[in-house]
Amino acid sequence: MLVHDKIRLRPIRLPHDILIAYPWYQDREVLYYSEGKGTNPYTRETINKMYSYLSKIGEVYIIEIKQSEEWIPIGDATLSKEMLPIVIGVKKYRSKGYGQQVLRLLIDRARKLNWSKLVVRKIFIYNTASKKLFESFGFDVISTSVDQYGRVYESLELYLK
């Protein structure tokens, strides 16, 4: 468990957390920014497959914030050498600085694991808030590409010291 003040990253518990995440992946805004324009809402089976895959390549966490002595799940994040997805699934908690706190915890964890770098594989060019977040921590754009649907995205990386 990774904790800082009133935010924690709790290791995912499957299948329990699929039900928690389900509403997040029904939100077209979440899907637009994380998966790209035109992505349909996820089924529980799709969420399970996503988390199972992410668990094989990294550490998957549920993002929780402390309110009135209770931990409330608001999103998910994965620390992997292949990618670094962060999703604030509950709309009212977006643009409140939680993504920044999550990224700080993930970078600290990667350093403790003695990783040399972190890679953000895909940020769509219209997701300026996410790009700004990663750049504020020193991530640099290393490439610009187009996916199979014609959507332009950038890849970023951060070398850890």
Image: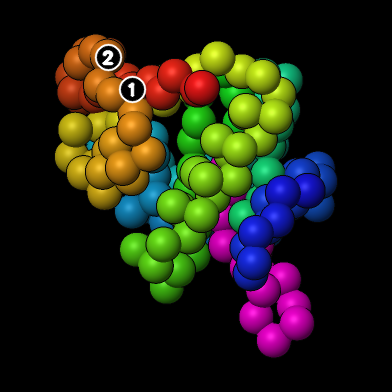
Magenta run includes residue 49: no
Q: Point out the residue furthest to the front here.
A: 161
Residue 17, above or below 97: above
Q: Which residue, given by chain and number where applicable, does mark 2 sit on?
A: 142
| Image position of 60 (left or right of 82) | right
Q: CA distance from mark 2 to mark 1?
A: 5 Å
Query: Residue 44 occupies which quadrant of the picture?
Result: top right
The residue stretch that appears in magenta: 64-78
Q: Which residue, given by chain and number where applicable, does mark 1 sit on?
A: 156
- Amino acid type of disc 2? Ile
From the image, give the main secondary structure of the stretch colored magenta.
strand
Residue 77, above or below 6: above
Crowding at dot 1, Cα within 10 Å, few <14 / some 14-19 / many 20+, comes out as many
- Amino acid type of disc 1? Leu
| Location of residue 128 in the rendering, given as x and y in whole percent from the top left corner | 21, 44
| Image position of 93 (left or right of 7) | left
Q: Are marks 2 and 1 in contact (CB under 8 Å)?
A: yes
Residue 59, above or below 119: below
